[in-house]
Amino acid sequence: MFRQTWAEINLSNIEHNIKLILNHFPKDTFFCPMVKANAYGHGDVKVAQFLEMLGVRHIGVCLIEEGLLLRQLGVSTDILVFRGFDSRGARKMIESKLTPVVSTWEQLETLIFLKEKTKIHIKFDTGMNRLGFEVAEVGEVLSRFKAQSHLELEGVLTHLYQSDDGLNPNGETVEQLSCFLNILEVFKSYAKNFHVLNSGGIVCKMLGASGILNQYDWGLRPGLLIYGYSPVLESGLDFKPAMTLQSRTNLIRNIKKGEGVSYGHTWKAPKDSKIAVVPIGYADGWHRILSNKTQVLWNGQKASLVGNICMDYLMLDVTGLTEEKENEVIFFGQSKMGTEISAANSAVDAQTITWEVLTSVGERVPRLYRK
């Protein structure tokens, strides 16, 4: 690397997180970790290959293109494609042995017309109002499917839209599951997998949620959770973040009281100050909204980001902090001194969510993997 900026991916932590989840569920529970959006910024190819090595039998992507990339680079495990498709996409999925998640009548009729033997999953909308058949259509969907001997129904699913309220017996998750239970009753003779629980739902069940959440062996589709972050705050569960985003200081500038930093001089030194210039910017996914708003670790010590973030650089106020030979910068993850900072902190400062912070790490930031 000519620029000392990279994301280190700890595969052992991903393995730890998966084992932590699966230890709370029966051995044969349907398990489909999500590797869409470049595995939430962690690198879809390497993560998918690692999951396959661990014996994971299903993984999920959003786009057909994501599934094709994994196939082209040797991933042979079952890949579910959640986004949807037209006739051209359907042919490509069948050719590449990708498993379509069917959400509309047009998609179902496309697969019926092609008459190719295909495994499918069928999605119903229980309140997300995004993708999926209407609950009222369940009988009609079953009748149409039953007439097609070339279609094998592997699973039926829905999507929780407020899964972190699963511990509330009167919450939205319980209401959705109650609705989905009617769909399960209709399809239980035709499908063996009914997968519902995303990361929030999984955590709620791990924390001992009772009632309908604990009543059935709901299938699992963890995303954020396998990468080490829980959507349920203060869960107390030992999930370990897998990514450390880090850099090294380019140079240090000494500036006088009143001098400004970066475009527009939105920050001016309140006293004589020491400024570290770091080679990462908004083109790498460190959003400009974080200008003058957040802290990172500089040699294990908290340093404030000052001035507007540039496309390729940002600046830190390191006045009074201890210098090291390499002057390590950690944006989230663990420093070599043992101190940590969470991507969730940056999400709060950027007025967004942890998912966006992770998936924003750009393609020009190399991923280095260790186990």
Image (spheres, helix red, strand yellow):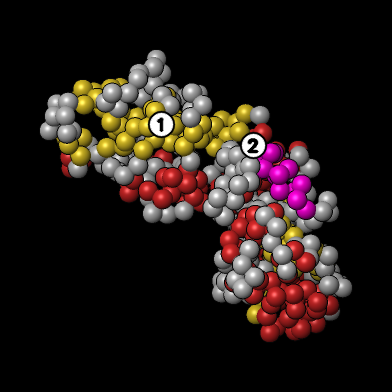
Q: Position of residue 235 (x, y in %)?
A: 59, 51
Relative to the observer, which residue lies in front, 168 or 318? 168
Query: Can you tell which mark lies on residue 231?
Result: none
Q: Is residue 20 magenta?
A: yes
Q: Residues within 10 Å of mark 2 (few under 14, many from 20)?
A: many
Q: For this rendering, which residue is in front, 209 or 342?
A: 209
Residue visible at 51% across and 26% down?
338
Disc 1 secondary structure class: strand
Q: Residue drawn at (51%, 51%), measured in percent from left and top?
A: 355
Q: Nearer the viewer, residue 210 or 268?
A: 210
Is any part of residue 102 visible from this angle?
no
Q: Amino acid at mark 2?
A: Asn
SS class, disc 2 = helix
Picture quadrant of residue 128: bottom right
* Magenta part of the chain: 13-25
Asked if one can make out residue 269 in the rendered structure from this viewpoint, the answer is yes
